Amino acid sequence: MFKNFEEFDKKSNQCIDEISKKFSGEDGKRHILVCGGTGCLSSSSDEILNRFQELIKEHNLEDKVTANKVGCFGFCSQGPFVKIFPEDTLYRMVKVNDAKDIIEKDIMNGQIVERLLYVDPQTKEKVTKQDDINFYKKQMRIALHGCGVINPEKIEETLGVGSFKGLERALKMDRADVIKEILDSGLRGRGGGGFPTGRKWQFAYAQEADEKYVVCNGDEGDPGAFMDRSILEGNPIAVIEGMMIAGYAIGAKNGYFYVRAEYPIAVNRLRIAIKQAEELGLIGDNIMGTDFSFRVHLRLGAGAFVCGEETALLNSIEGQRGMPRPRPPFPAVKGLWGKPTIINNVETLATVPYILREGAAKFNALGTAKSKGTKVFALGGKVNNVGLVEVPMGTTLRELIYDIGGGIPNGKEFKAIQTGGPSGGCLTKDDLDVEIDYDNLIARGSMMGSGGAIVMDEDNCMVDVAKFYMEFICDESCGKCSPCRIGTKRMLEILTKITQGKGTMQDLEDLEELAEAVKANSLCGLGQTAANPIISTMGKFKDEYLAHIQDKKCPAHVCKNLMEYHIDKEKCTGCSMCERNCPVSTIHATDYVSPGHKQPAREIDPTKCIKCGMCQSVCRFGAVEKR
C-alpha cells in the first residue's frame, strides 16, 4: 500500500532501474525471453520455457541466467520466438529440442545459433536483432508497450516499463484537465467507430449521478482479429491503468472488463494483474494516498459477436440477453444499470497511459490531421509476414502489405485487402498508396474497424469472400430487428445462389436493394454495416459477379459448382498417386502415354468428381489444374 506519491515513486523507480539493468546487462546476468502469446503457446512455447528452466538447473546456471515468458512478439508466422538479453539476439521458429543448443552454445559459450536466426528473403542475410528485421522497422509500439519485453504475470516488470506513471500524473490533475489531455491528444476510439475518446469522457463527466462506470470492451470477435487478446496477454496492467485514468476523469469508482471466455490466457493474466495491483494498493481505496478509490471487476462473454456492440455488451454484463438497445439515450448518459458509463475497447485504454505519461503533444505529433497516434492491425491472409503490427496512422497500405508484410506468397498477384472485418470492405491495387486513417478508409469504401486486415490474392473469389462474411453475420445476428434478421438471410441466399451458378441479373439488383435497406434500417452497428462487404465487392469486382451469373464461371476457380479439376496429360507421369487417393474413385488411366514416361496418363470423370481437391494436393508434378 502506497501512502503517498513519494512511496509509489520509490518503488516504481526501483523497478525501472532493475529492468534497465536487466536489458543492458548491468545486472551481470543473461535473460531468456520466450513468447507466451496464444499463437506461440499453440506451438509448444510453454514446453520450450520449461526445457530452458530444466537446462538452467542442470548446468547450475541459476545465478547467471533467467528464463521467463513474455507477451506476443508480433511476428506470428515466424514463431515461437526466443530473445536473449542483453545482446538482444532473436531466435525464431524455435522447437523444444533447440533449447539445448541455445543454452550450450549461446548462453554458455557465447556462440550464436545461426540456424535459428531470421533470414532476410531479399538479401538472404541472417539477422540477429529484432529491430533490424523489415517486419519491425516501420512499427512503433504504444498500445503494445511492454508486449514481448516484460513478464505479464509479474507486476514489478510492468512497473519497470512505466506502468501507473500515467495514473500518477492524472491524480495530480483536475479531472477536467485529464479529459482535456485526451482531447488534445486526438485519440479516437480503436474499437471501430473512431469516435473521439475525450468527447465520450466529457459526456459522462457532465452527468450528475451517484454512481458511474467504466467498461472495457474486450469482446473481440472479427474473423482473424487478435489485437485485443494480445494486449491483454502481453501487458494487462496497461489496460487496467487506462481504465483507472478514465474512471478518475469521469468520477467513477468501478470498472468492468468484458472479455470473451474464448480467451482463457488473456483472462487468466488479467486476473493475476488485478490481484497483484490490489496487493500493492494500486487498485482499491485511497490510491497513492489520494481520495480516489477504484475497483476492477471481470465478466466473461459467451462469444456472441453482437456483444461487441456496446449496448448489447451492457445487457450481457447485467445478466440479460446480449441484444442492442435503441439509442439515445447513449451509455454516457444512461448505461450500465442505468448509470452514466463510458465504454472503450482494449486498445483505446492501453493507449491512454502513454498519453498521460508522455503528454498529449507527443501522441498528437504522430499520424494524420484527423487520425492521431498509432493503430494495431492483425495482418493475415495471403501475406508472407503474418502477425500483429502497430504502425503510425498515415502508413500506406503498400507499406503495410509489402514492407512490413513482406508481400504475397508464391509470387501471386495481390487482389484486395479486407479491413474492418465483417463491417468493413475491400481495398484494391488502386488503394495501395492511400494513407491509413479513419476518414481515408471510409472514403474508399472500407473502414478501420478494430484492426483486422486480411490480404487476398488472385486465388480468392470476391463473391465467395462476400458470402463468407454474410454467413458469419447471419450466424451472429441477435435477431432483434427484422432488417438484420431477415435481410442478411435473404442476402446470403442470393450470394449462395450466385456461387452455385444459378444467379440472374435480377439477383444483382435485389442484392443492391437489400444491402441499402439493411444498412439504413437496422438497429445496431452489426446490421448497419452487415452489407459493407457486399457493397464493396460489387463496386470493385462487378466483373466477378457477372462472370458467375452470365458465364457460369468462377474466375478464381473457388466456387465448386462453377469449376472442375483437369489433368494435363502432357505433364502427367502416370504415377497413379491421384487415382489411389481419390475418395470417390473418379480417376482412371487413359490410352495416352506422355513422351518420356512409361505409364499412361490419368483423367478425371467430371460427372463423378466431388471437387475435394485431393488429386491436386497429392500430385507432385503440377499436372492437376483447376478450370
Image: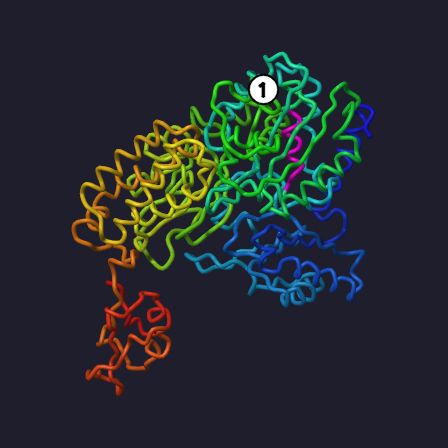
Q: Which residue does the image show at 52% across and 51% down from the upper left?
A: 75
Q: Is residue 3 above or below residue 436?
A: above
Query: Residue 225: x percent and y percent?
Result: 49, 44
Query: Residue 331: x percent and y percent?
Result: 55, 22
Q: Main secondary structure of the magenta part?
A: helix
Q: Give the secondary structure at mark 1.
A: helix
Q: Name which quarter of the figure residue 568 lies in.
A: bottom left
Q: How many marks?
A: 1
Verify whether residue 574 appears in magenta. no
Q: Quadrant of the C terminus?
A: bottom left
Q: Colour scheme of this structure image?
A: rainbow
Q: Name which quarter of the figure residue 198 lies in.
A: top right
297 or 27: nearer the eye?
297
Query: Residue 9: x percent and y percent?
Result: 77, 29
Q: Which residue does the image show at 47% across and 49% down from the upper left?
A: 134
- In this rendering, does residue 253 appear at all? yes
Residue that protrudes farthest toward the left in the picture? 550
The magenta segment = 235-245
Verify whether residue 244 appears in magenta. yes
**Is residue 79 toward the left or the right of residue 424 in the image?**
right
Q: Name which quarter of the figure residue 626 lies in.
A: bottom left
Q: Quadrant of the N terminus?
A: top right
Query: Residue 2: x percent and y percent?
Result: 81, 28
- In this rendering, does residue 427 appear at all? no
Residue on which the image places disc 1 = 181
Q: Is residue 568 above or below residue 439?
A: below
